[in-house]
Image (cartoon, helix red, strand yellow):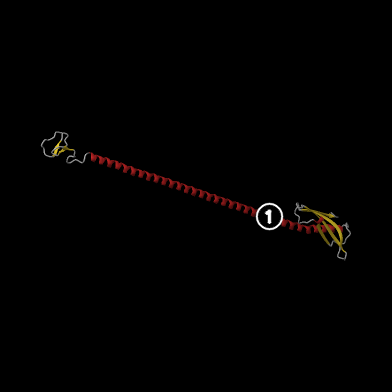
Amino acid sequence: MDEPRGAPAGWYPTSDGSQQYWDGRQWLAIPPPGSTGGPNRRTRTLVAFIASLVVAAVIGGGVALFQLDRAEQRAAAEQATSAAAAAAAAEDESAQAAEEASAQAAEQASIEAAEQASAEAAAQEQESRDEQERELREGMVPEIEASVQTMAEEHIGDDLIDAAEVLSVMCSPVAGGSVGDLDQETTVFECFVATEDNGDGTMSGFGYNATMNWTTGRYTYALGDP
């Protein structure tokens, strides 16, 4: 730009449309009026932009860390919830197993009690039948004795035995047997027919025998020892 000789100090237009200050002797490199500072402003703008990037990075990093922390917390919460659900399920399963075991034990105890009660009832019923059988056998002895007496009286009448009358008849199982022994299907009796009182507390008479078949309910009898 040409130097304005003798021109007073002030701002003069330049060929690029800007302005430059003339102090009366030389051109000064100062910003023209209305200028925002040129390079300095651009520098400040760049610094502000970089600062905003740094702030954004810091904020973004914080947000990322916050989101990561939230994710970790969420994962930990989900894991804790899953563990609690698993523990609850295991507890329910254990309780159900214990309940089933208790029910099975109660059922088994009920079955055993029923079986024991049934066995006891069967034993009592068998004992009752056995007692009835013993009473029946005991009741058959007088019948046998009556039959033997009838036979002895007939023998007296037929002069098969020398006696005036039959005083008494007593039949007893042979060899210490017992009519109460239900394992014996047959019992042999030795019968004494008293026909004379000896006057000394003893009796004289004749021997008879009888055989009872408890299965058929029939018996036989005859004169003489078994």
Position above or below: 168 against 18:
below
Q: Residue furthest front?
A: 25
Tell me what residue is drawn at x 49 percent, y 49 percent: 87
Q: Quadrant of the C terminus?
A: bottom right
Q: Which residue is mark 1?
A: 123
In the image, residue 46 lies at what x, y percent?
Answer: 27, 40
| Number of numbered markers | 1
Lateral position of residue 15 relative to residue 60, left or right: left
Position above or below: 166 against 105:
below
Could you tell me the amino acid type at mark 1?
Answer: Ala
Tell me what residue is drawn at x 39 percent, y 46 percent: 69
Tell me the quarter of the picture where residue 169 sits: bottom right
Foreground pick, 67 / 159: 67
Position above or below: 138 against 58:
below
Tell me the quarter of the picture where residue 20 sits: top left
Q: Residue furthest left?
A: 6
Q: Pointer 1: residues within 10 angstroms few (<14), some, or many (20+)? A: few
In the image, residue 97 lies at what x, y percent?
Answer: 54, 49
Foreground pick, 23 / 11: 23
Lateral position of residue 1 relative to residue 152, left or right: left
In the image, residue 148 lies at what x, y percent?
Answer: 82, 57
Q: Quadrant of the N terminus?
A: top left
Name the element at disc 1.
helix
In the image, residue 218 lies at what x, y percent?
Answer: 77, 53
Foreground pick, 169 / 62: 62
Lateral position of residue 127 relative to residue 144, left or right: left
